[in-house]
Amino acid sequence: NYVVNYLQLDHINPPNDHIKIGIISRRRKRFILNEYELVESVERLGYECILLPLETMTLHEQMYELRSLDILIGIHGSALDNSVFLHPGSVMIQLLPYTVEHRVTFPGSANAAKVVYMEWQLKDRTKAVFHWDLLDQANSEKLKRHTKDEILTMGQSQADSRETLMFWINQDIIVPINEWEILIKSAVIKSNAKKRGL
């Protein structure tokens, strides 16, 4: 990996004595509204968990932290393509907002890097913040005939067009703790951590 070698980070690995999980913390849009609660939940499970504000980190800082992770987690967005910098056998989890079916390149990028791809989808729309101004900007004639409730009931696959994609993918979400803990436990089982005796 050219970038890792150039930054002289090829010696950086996940810790030998514990599991390390990173959550991408976005600063401009697509917020995980309870990310601090998620970090605390992971720590209660006995794992190290850090927030990764990639937008404010240097390239060296980003690569260093990514190379030290067992599991990378983030809401749908281009930062998930950073899975290519994880070690083979690591896990990347995509958090999909309510009804979003647009997975883009993330499963393929993870697979190419020999990283385990997992995903979780928000099922409870009361735990999503929708930015209706983005739908207004799309100026979709089809959706002007429907109420907000009807649009959300239809979901992305039925109510979508290229113009409305930004509305669907730019939700802010709350991840329910009970679902989160099940997801984390499953990711740990699928990760390389077992090979390290963890």
Image (cartoon, rainbow, N blue to C red):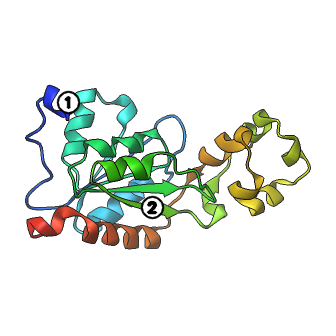
- Mark 2 Cα within 10 Å, few/some/many (few <14, many 20+)? some
- Image quarter of residue 64: top left
Label 1: which residue? 2
Residue 52 at x, y percent in the picture: 33, 42
Mark toward the viewer: 1 or 2: 1
Task: State the mark number for residue 19.
Answer: none
In this rendered view, identify the residue nearer to me: 136 or 109: 109
Q: Is residue 159 left or right of residue 187?
A: right
* Amino acid type assigned to the residue bearing label 2 in the image: Glu
| Vertical position of residue 29 compared to residue 197: above or below | above
Q: Is residue 102 left or right of residue 6?
A: right
Residue drawn at x 18%, y 47% is 68
User: Outermost residue, right direction?
Assistant: 145
Mark 2: secondary structure: strand
Label 2: which residue? 119
Quadrant where the N terminus sits is top left
Quadrant where the C terminus sits is bottom left
Q: Mark 1 or 2 closer to N-term?
A: 1
Q: Is residue 164 left or right of residue 61?
A: right
